Amino acid sequence: MQHETVKAKSLLSKPIVADAWFHVNRSMNAYRGCEHGCVYCDGMAEHYHVDNFTTHIRIKENAAKVLRRELKKDGYTSQTELETETLWRFMDPEDAKRMALRVPRKKVIGVCGGVSDGYQPAEKEHKITRQVLETLLDFRMPVFVLTKSDLVLRDLDLLKEINESAFANIMFTITLSDEKQRGIFEPKASSTPERFAALKEIRKAGLPGGVMATPIIPTIGDNLENMTALAKEAKRAKAEFIQFGGMTLKPGRQKGYFLRVIKRRFPDKLSEISNIYANNNKYGTPDWKRLPVNVMLRGYKVCRSVGIRDRSVRNKLKSEPDSNNAVLGVLLDIEFYMRYMLGMPWNKIRPFHELSARIERGIEDLVELRREGQLKSRLLITDRMVSIVEEIMDTGSCRYIQDLVQKTDSKVAGETVFVAFPDE
Ligand code: SF4
């Protein structure tokens, strides 16, 4: 294993809006490469230009410094600066309030789970992710963590503080309940029981958190036994949800390595898996017709039978009005169901996505807008969409999503479904 310290020139990814999977706005990687060595890892693909991804780890020693610089460039002020800034200390409270209003809306920063795990073994010694968390706490930024390591518990003190000042949402990627299989596909990550135990502790500490059961490996992890065991364990750990997802294999290094391991460890599965990814799609998406199981639909069904939420939860930003968060949460659920459960075309999904993005980028309290009769003009939506927004504001849900859920139930039961768009 080669460890090399490097200086990063930049850190944060381009802004992301209305992310229906992780609810993140910017992401970053404290390391290049990942020692966890997952056989299916996307980071191995040529697309990311990281050679020897699992054996040569580049440690971004200046990550926290670069992050501080980038946050300041985006207009954020750290708590340390606020407390020492003479201008703020002696300013008229009303002026200070007006200035504070000009601070841009807080972005949710994904500190790991981009193209490397921030809690991989190198973090024990180098503590780059910890330094990053300290910086984010100083800026009172909300944080998202996705990891396969229980090393995250080392930083529980910091994460709790972040959760009090903004929020810290901790998700664990867990894909295989069988430890022998987990050892083959995720060799240096924490074991499955260790990850569930860590999640349990995170939840006990009062932090939001759940399970991303993705990628589910076709023909190996997509059986009912594995998926049900994961959902039951997630429920026992008091996870807010478990969300299942499929696997992509980009042609080239990623697919080549994965298939070599399958040939060695699961020779009887080689021809079926090779066929599923024979299309060589540049994004690595499988040939859907050759997949033995739709893991999204099976995951939905499993969650229903176990009694756990099948969707990640959107957390409210401190500055965000309750109604805006409630509407956003349901709109993102609508997008998720339309897209991944029912396979509806983008032109149908787009109005919901665009509305989510508009609200998320920052808009006045929807309650106020409604009182002033400005929902339609400020949100730039049709009357039908206005009624959906109002229904969510009044009840926390709407008939449209209930209809989508019902259609998903029918699809799971093998029935043909027709889904009407709100304006049809
Ligand atoms: S933990 Fe994530 S980034 Fe690291 S090797 Fe596994 S899949 Fe890749």
Image: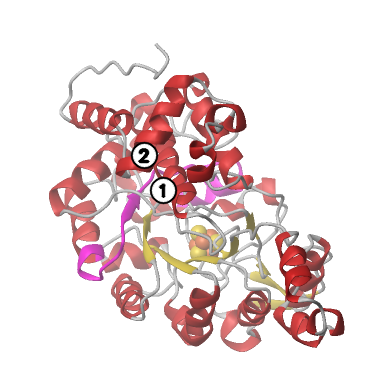
Q: Crowding at label 2, few (<14), some or many (≥20) Cα neighbours within 10 Å?
A: many
Decide if residue 292 is on the left or right side of residue 414. right
- Give the quarter of the figure containing the C terminus: top left
Q: Residues within 10 Å of mark 1 (few under 14, many from 20)?
A: some
- The three-letter amino acid code for the residue at tag 2 is Ile
Q: Residue at x 80, y 87 (%)?
A: 84
**Residue 420, image x, y percentages:** 34, 16
Residue 338: give x, y in percent of width and height.
39, 29
- Verify CB contact (< 8 Å) between mark 1 and mark 2: yes
Image quarter of the N terminus = bottom right
Mark 1 and mark 2: span between their CA atoms? 7 Å
Residue 154 falls left or right of residue 2 = left
Q: Is mark 1 within 8 Å of ligand 1?
A: no
Q: Is residue 227 above or below residue 165?
A: above
Question: Is disc 2 placed on a helix, strand or loop?
Answer: helix
Residue 252 versus residue 225 in the image, above or below: above
Q: Which mark is residue 326?
A: 1
Q: Which residue is mark 2?
A: 392
Q: Position of residue 58 (x, y in %)?
A: 71, 71
Q: Secondary structure at mark 1?
A: helix
Residue at left 73%, top 75%?
93
Rendered residue at 77%/73% (across/down): 68
Residue 5 seen from this side: no
Say whether residue 249 is magenta.
Answer: yes
- Sequence-wise first label, 1 or 2: 1
Horizontal and vertical percent position of residue 300: 25, 42
Question: Magenta residues, as a range?
Answer: 234-260
Residue 388 visible: yes
Residue type marked 1: Ala
